[in-house]
Image: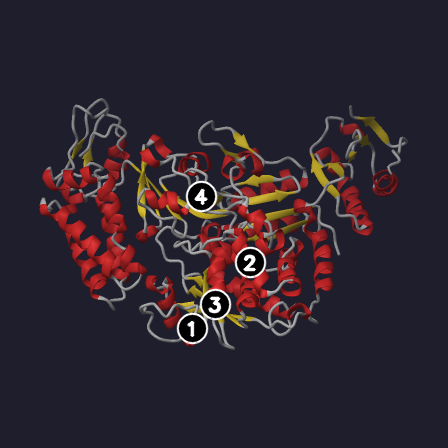
Amino acid sequence: MAKLTIEDLKKLRDSAKKSTALREGETSVKVTVHMGTCGIAAGAREVMDALLQEVTEAKRSDIRVITSGCMGMCSSEPNVTVEISGNEPVIYQHMDRNRMRQVFKRHVLLGEVQTDFALARVK
Amino acid sequence: MTTFRTDLLLCGGTGCRASGSIQIKEALMRELARQKLDTEIRIIETGCNGFCAQGPIMIVQPDNIFYQKLKVEDIPNLVEEHFLKGRPVKKLFYKEPASAATIPSMDDIPFYSKQKLIVLRNRGAVDPENIDEYIARDGYIGLGKALLEMTPEQIIAEVKTSGLRGRGGAGFPTGLKWEFASRSKGDVKYALCNADEGDPGAFMDRSVLEADPHAVLEGMIIAGKAIGAHQGYIYCRAEYPLAIKRLGIAIRQARNYGLLGKDILGSGHDFDIEVYKGAGAFVCGEETALMQSLEGRRGMPRSRPPFPAQQGLWKKPTVLNNVETYANIAQIIQNGGAWYASIGTETSKGTKVFALTGAVSNIGLVEVPMGISLREIIFDIGGGIPKKRKFKAVQLGGPSGGCVPEQYLDTPVDYESIMKVGAIMGSGGMIVMNDQTCMVDMARFFMDFIQDESCGKCTPCREGTRRMLQILEKITQGLGEPADLDLLEELSHMIKNSALCGLGQTGPNPVLSTLRYFRHEYEAHIYEKRCPAKRCVKLLKFEVDPEKCIKCGICFKGCPAKAIEWKKKEPALILKDKCIKCMTCITNCPADAIS
């Protein structure tokens, strides 16, 4: 490895920060995949896979991916909740890989709520 | 780069390793793989998290959930419930000892919330074996500033402004020490790090080295620039294998990045560091003895002057600082001396790390701002004395220090105030004692330690500590005489005034401070042949007082020698021919009925 200059060091810091951002960085978007037994049975794991791929490609370190339990509406699973700071959380229903990608690209990144898949807006 | 959704920060400090964190890590890896979560969730083994009594500890981020006392058999359920299904497992949360309430979030646990982290800012938050994680938290940025934007004089001025004083215990102003060394003439100078932590009950330096080795390296490189040194040595005791291993990894990684070696960060400054393993003699924490040992000779102190700043290692100008002192430096350079000086009291700036141990609920490593009271540390952060016992005293500064009794618990933590009540700041050992500690026996323990560790070079220390130990042993065995107390005091003052090095000069302190605050305990041993704390075996009869006995049977159940007869609703009876005098019954008796 070549010797670092101060510029290299700062670049290295900024890229390393992305890797440790989970622990301390700013959170501007929280995406929750509901992973109750019902959610998993309905395909929540695949939704999670697709979501993590999207997060990786987006190169954004301020997005947190969280799992949580069943919401009680098992028939609407897999459910995903998107919460952009300062906005009301939106719950999506019957998610799959493609719907997840669309929600991520349009809602998470661009802020356009995908009403077609939405179950509810949480107040 | 793959994106992980969760980081599991598993404590891999020596404390948590001893309580099984390696097995926990293996079990986690197994379960995560089985549930196919290993691409989504990452395990980071961190250094000491500080809350050692609750180990093994794991923090889950970004959820900020604190799990404690993990067992291998908890892991499958934990992985499925929390990491797969997102339902944190309450059973493994921290429980507040007083209210029995469970607290899921680390920031809400009183042990953490009252602390202020500078030295320990990376503890439990980074992988100490990965330099990139240190850099992610602005590591080596202070070094860049010191090397590229500051002159040695400016660095020294900044450290002076900060008011930082030696954290090894004596509290000498660090900036002044550096100034002396920088003014000494000579091409070859050395910057040394004292990691020969030896006080019984102290583990601050080990934890810093294990959790954040780069912080120490960075401080040393900056010291090198300030005094004009190009070589540093870390003198670390061989009993700290994990600290030595992580230092070795850190040094290799820093060399790879060119942060050690020639022309660091293109500044033209050269500096390299080696670790020297010490054999664990207490006296080698004394600066001149440490340097003798580094030179390959028997570790014995020599008289000063010449001071190490003029003639130290191999007779070259040398600066020696403690681990914790160095770990402050990069922060001071990065944020400015004035920032550091804004924390603390008039004479003592910044924070101090303490190893809180003994009869206290929350045993562990704490970093507090100077000026906080001992009471806050012991009762708010430490959670008070367990088992409804009463606080008796707290021992500060190990064998060189003294004890502080209840009436001085509101003493603020700073060098001068603690000195006034007869103890010393010391390197940070803080041993809490309850009413079951015999202060004479405690003084005997420390004198035994000092006498054992005395190098034997000077007579007052070699012979004097031995005489003192003999007298203390006599008293604890019930053979003490009235004249012994005066003799102890006379010997103490003589040794303090005439011993060659700090070990001897401070060795009588535990005796003097217990005589000052607990003279009545000495007198009970001598005149009444009675140990008030019931710790000195020779002064105990091992008899149950039938009037005090509450007939609970706890002594009967605990006796390992089956030497106690007890039936429900009848007082217990100790059979003297079977009794092995292990004191289990005395320690456990809720009614204090056995003496």
Classify residue B424 as left or right of residue A49: left
Callout in the foreground (1, 4): 1
Q: Secondary structure at mark 2?
A: helix
Q: Secondary structure at mark 3?
A: helix
Q: Chain of mark 4?
A: B
Say whether mark 4 and mark 3 are on the same chain. Answer: yes
Q: Earlier in the sequence, mark 4 or mark 2?
A: 4
Q: Earlier in the sequence, mark 2 or mark 3?
A: 2
Say whether mark 3 and mark 2 are on the same chain. Answer: yes
| As drawn, A56 above or below B68 | below
Callout in the foreground (3, 4): 3
Q: Are the two marked residues, 2 and 1, in contact with CB atoms closer than 8 angstroms?
A: no
Q: Chain of mark 1?
A: B
Q: Is residue B211 visible?
A: no
Q: Which residue is mark 4?
A: B53
Callout in the foreground (4, 2): 2
| As drawn, B352 above or below B230 | above
User: In percent of the image, x 52 and y 77: which residue is there?
Assistant: B187
Give amino acid for label 3.
Ala
